[in-house]
Image: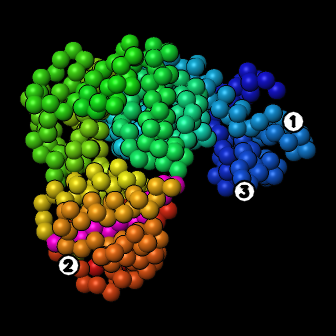
């Protein structure tokens, strides 16, 4: 069956599922494959569970009129998403970068939603599977899409751009994320610049942080470029939003066109995310009240930049993920926060490849420069790199240690890669 015919079926059954445990009545089930699973094996179960059609790529599982046989299920899913996006003449804003993608996505969505009907990437649906699933949620009534893209190898952002066909885009920053896959910081920069390449070729609009020299250089060939940056002036010129925060901790406060705006976020790196949302909101015609409302309505969640009160203690939780760059800016921000008796709990950073030992050692040294009350290290890489601090090979061991301590009137920072589940230590702090 060709793509046009599949698209007509999708229009009648616009809910797409890839997991038989999450079926909805009359959905389309795409039998995806992975290293350890084969969705074709669950095709009949999907029909029994209420799916209207299943899309398979192994002929022995196409056993009835509700079974659609294609050459490759994943590629069909991606092509269907691209085709659907192309039918909708709306702005699609792509967000890539090493750090801050999700916060920028959620901030920007909160701002734009004060005026438009917005679809934004749910959760972490930002890869070669999650992105098409997100695009296939677009409805005719949606006015703007805010799409996060996540990559861990070169050419992946280029593929995601070909699927999403973004009209606008932003690279949040370049940092030391997924070094195992990218090979080096230069590989990271090239990967993120794939969005710039797409926008240049398709005459799209790039929003660029003017304080970041690398981003300015790599975006310089784009015809339509809107620059934003922190600056002493609060004057807003034609395509340049210049703002400077009055406070960065414990919450960000700044003045925008004479109006004070207070965000629950903290730190200069989060102010960059706010600046992006202000600039993009302004580009799409939002007034200052709408922008203020959107910025102030965003509450950090999902283990990102959360402030949590626990007894007499205050916990700064930023444990969704971690890499050397995000660790450094978060630690620096925590050090600048008001308060004494600060404890830092760091979990291993994953996907660093040959840089693992060096980067963990570097981060310990960086952390020592702030003279925290205590540094607690969790994970095998930190355990091997440790010389002077309390360290544990597992999160469970760290939890037992914290449970045995009477920590009071302290400020506690928790951060680590997703697989470390550092957030589970909150229950051990009392």
Tell me the crowding category of disc 2: few under 14, some 14 to 19, or many 20 or more residues within 10 angstroms, Cα based: some
Q: Which residue is mark 2?
A: 408
Q: Nearer the viewer, residue 428 or 384?
A: 384
Q: CA distance from mark 3 to mark 1?
A: 28 Å
Q: Does residue 285 lie above or below 190 as drawn?
A: above
Q: Does residue 341 lie above or below 31 as drawn?
A: below
Residue 247 spot, x, y in % from top left: 12, 46
Task: Give the mark, 3 or 1, whose residue is nearer the N terminus.
Answer: 3
Could you tell me which quadrant the C terminus lies in? bottom left
Residue 161 spot, x, y in % from top left: 54, 28
Numbered circle sitting on residue 65: 1
Q: Which residue is mark 3?
A: 36
Residues at badges 3 and 1 in contact (C-beta under 8 Å)? Answer: no
Q: Nearer the viewer, residue 325 or 105?
A: 325
For image coordinates 47% across by 33% down, the residue present is: 190
Asked if the stretch drawn in magenta spans residue 349, the answer is yes
Would residue 129 appear left or right of 264 to someone viewing this image?
Answer: right
For image coordinates 34% across by 51% down, the residue present is: 326
Residue at disc 3, secondary structure: loop
Residue at disc 1, secondary structure: loop
Magenta-drawn segment? 341-353
- Front position among marks 3 and 2: 3
Marks counted in the figure total 3
Residue 181 spot, x, y in % from top left: 55, 46
- Front position among marks 2 and 1: 2
Q: Does residue 135 lie above or below 31 as drawn?
A: above
């Amino acid at each position: 069956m060709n793509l046009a015919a599949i698209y007509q079926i999708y229009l009648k059954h616009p809910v797409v599922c890839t997991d038989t445990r999450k079926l909805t009545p009359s959905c389309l089930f795409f039998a995806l494959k992975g290293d350890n699973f084969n969705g074709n094996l669950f095709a009949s179960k999907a029909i029994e569970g209420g799916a209207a059609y299943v899309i398979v790529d192994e002929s022995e599982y196409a056993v009835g009129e509700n079974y659609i046989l294609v050459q490759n299920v994943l590629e069909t899913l991606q092509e269907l998403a691209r085709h659907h996006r192309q039918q909708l003449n709306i702005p699609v804003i792509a967000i890539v970068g090493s750090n801050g993608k999700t916060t920028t996505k959620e901030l920007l969505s909160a701002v734009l939603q004060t005026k438009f009907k917005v679809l934004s990437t749910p959760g972490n649906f930002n890869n070669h599977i999650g992105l098409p699933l997100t695009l296939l949620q677009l409805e005719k009534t949606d006015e703007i899409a805010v799409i996060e893209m996540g990559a861990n190898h070169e050419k992946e952002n280029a593929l995601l751009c070909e699927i999403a066909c973004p009209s606008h885009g932003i690279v949040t920053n370049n940092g030391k994320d997924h070094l195992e896959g990218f090979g080096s910081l230069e590989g990271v920069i090239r990967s993120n610049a794939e969005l710039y390449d797409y926008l240049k070729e398709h005459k799209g609009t790039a929003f660029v942080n003017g304080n970041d020299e690398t981003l300015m250089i790599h975006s310089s060939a784009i015809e339509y470029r809107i620059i934003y940056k922190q600056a002493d002036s609060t004057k807003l010129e034609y395509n340049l939003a210049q703002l400077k925060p009055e406070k960065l901790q414990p919450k960000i406060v700044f003045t925008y066109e004479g109006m004070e705006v207070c965000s629950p976020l903290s730190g200069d790196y989060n102010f960059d995310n706010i600046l992006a949302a202000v600039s993009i909101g302004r580009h799409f015609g939002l007034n200052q009240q709408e922008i203020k409302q959107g910025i102030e309505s965003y509450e950090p969640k999902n283990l990102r930049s959360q402030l949590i009160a626990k007894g007499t203690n205050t916990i700064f939780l930023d444990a969704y993920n971690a890499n050397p760059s995000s660790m450094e800016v978060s630690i620096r921000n925590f050090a600048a926060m008001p308060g004494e008796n600060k404890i830092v709990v760091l979990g291993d950073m994953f996907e660093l490849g040959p840089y693992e030992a060096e980067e963990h050692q570097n981060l310990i040294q960086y952390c020592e420069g702030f003279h925290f009350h205590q540094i607690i290290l969790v994970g095998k890489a930190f355990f091997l790199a440790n010389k002077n601090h309390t360290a544990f090979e597992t999160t469970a061991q760290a939890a037992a240690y914290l449970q045995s301590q009477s920590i009071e009137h302290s400020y506690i920072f928790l951060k680590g890669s997703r697989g470390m589940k550092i957030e589970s230590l909150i229950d051990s702090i009392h």
